[in-house]
Amino acid sequence: MAAIPALDPEAEPSMDVILVGSSELSSSVSPGTGRDLIAYEVKANQRNIEDICICCGSLQVHTQHPLFEGGICAPCKDKFLDALFLYDDDGYQSYCSICCSGETLLICGNPDCTRCYCFECVDSLVGPGTSGKVHAMSNWVCYLCLPSSRSGLLQRRRKWRSQLKAFYDRESENPLEMFETVPVWRRQPVRVLSLFEDIKKELTSLGFLESGSDPGQLKHVVDVTDTVRKDVEEWGPFDLVYGATPPLGHTCDRPPSWYLFQFHRLLQYARPKPGSPRPFFWMFVDNLVLNKEDLDVASRFLEMEPVTIPDVHGGSLQNAVRVWSNIPAIRSRHWALVSEEELSLLAQNKQSSKLAAKWPTKLVKNCFLPLREYFKYFSTELTSSL
């Protein structure tokens, strides 16, 4: 991934990228293949760009691209939905914001933006050679951040955030509704209810909590036996509710299912009122202690199947957790084919191990990165380990 130096927030944003490539697209060029056809079809054949997939150049358009004017074919639509909220460990999105693929990416220099664009999309839609010019710039801001909405053939949609939500809700097979992403100027610090396990260290390392932050931003509760709705309402409101079963081998006087039932009970107390547009997220993690009956109950209560997140080193399975969550992209990013036999054997080995039990929070840490689209974060430097 080719990184662009960070944007100086005090400096005037460069407008070079708005002009780059516009003259090159004004002349008709010989048609090529794939994305090379886009400029030719629009300029020479006067084809409406909404009738062309701007991700691959196909004329078999399924629907409209949610972020930029232009169409998107069915295969590219599926790829876009799978990769929309995927993040790398550096905190930037893993794929191009236009085509959701690409090998070499240009990173937006706006410290409040995490989006990337591939060389191929930039050259085909903004103008040949634009990617090289952008790569050489010192304070480039991307096509969703620029004041101007048009750069060559690339035209940002009006109200693209609501367009993105409508696209996801209409096209995704995920039964959960997507929350509309929040503009930077409206993002507030996330308010967290952390049940049983304290995730303050993880959220701080991701930049969601400041070191020494207001204790009101994260409420950690271990024993919730006597917690009632009034308590949760007085502690809140909350934007994220997290809960987990203890790790294998952890001394505990309660059955594993107790953690599931208590999490579900308090989750209902913390939810916004029906119809509220306020983004609200939750996550429940099983550290391989729930039995099959408990897993079935969890999936029924939480209205989804779990995602298995493995920790593999040297080709062998070292650890794993099961996760239920409405945070975007957890299934597409972290879903793995790990057989129940493998998980059962892992659980038996860990149960018999004499090593001190640890909460494997690191496995789910980066699952929180998509929340950058919704909440304020205080650091752009992510720590690679805890």
Image: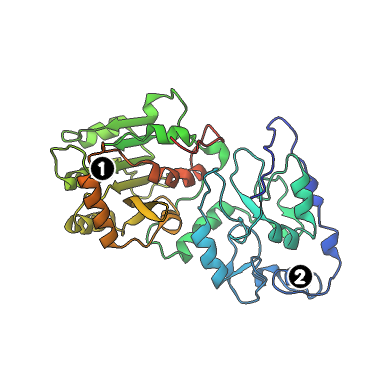
Query: Does dot 2 land on a helix, a strand or a loop?
Result: helix
Task: Name the mark nearer the viewer: 2 or 1.
Answer: 1
Query: Does dot 1 land on a helix, a strand or a loop?
Result: loop
Asked if marks 2 and 1 touch (Cβ < 8 Å), the reply is: no
- Give the residue at x 58% y 55%: 95
Name the residue type under label 1: Pro
Depicted 19 relative to depicted 110: above or below: below
Q: Is residue 276 left or right of residue 356?
A: right
Measured from the top left, where is residue 97 in percent x and y? 60, 55
Mark 1 Cα shell of 10 Å, populated few (<14), some (14-19), many (≥20): many
Which tag, 2 or 1, sits closer to the chain's start?
A: 2
Depicted 175 relative to depicted 346: above or below: below
- Give the residue at x 30% y 63%: 339
Quarter of image, res 273: top left
Q: Is residue 245 left or right of residue 67?
A: left
| Residue 382's disc number | none
Depicted 295 relative to depicted 111: above or below: below
Instruction: Check disc 1 and report the residue beneath it.
Output: 247
- Decide which of 356, 282 is in the foreground and name it: 356
Position of the C terminus by quadrant: top left
- Give the residue at x 22% y 39%: 354
Mark 2 Cα shell of 10 Å, populated few (<14), some (14-19), many (≥20): some
Depicted 61 relative to depicted 82: above or below: below
Measured from the top left, where is residue 250 in percent x and y? 21, 39
Q: Is residue 13 left or right of residue 53?
A: right
Measured from the top left, where is residue 245 in percent x and y? 24, 44
Measured from the top left, where is residue 366 in percent x and y? 45, 45
Name the residue type under label 2: Val
Q: Is residue 267 left or right of residue 309?
A: left
Q: Disc 2 and disc 1: Cα gap in Å? A: 58 Å
Instruction: Check disc 2 and report the residue beneath it.
Output: 42
Q: How many marks?
A: 2
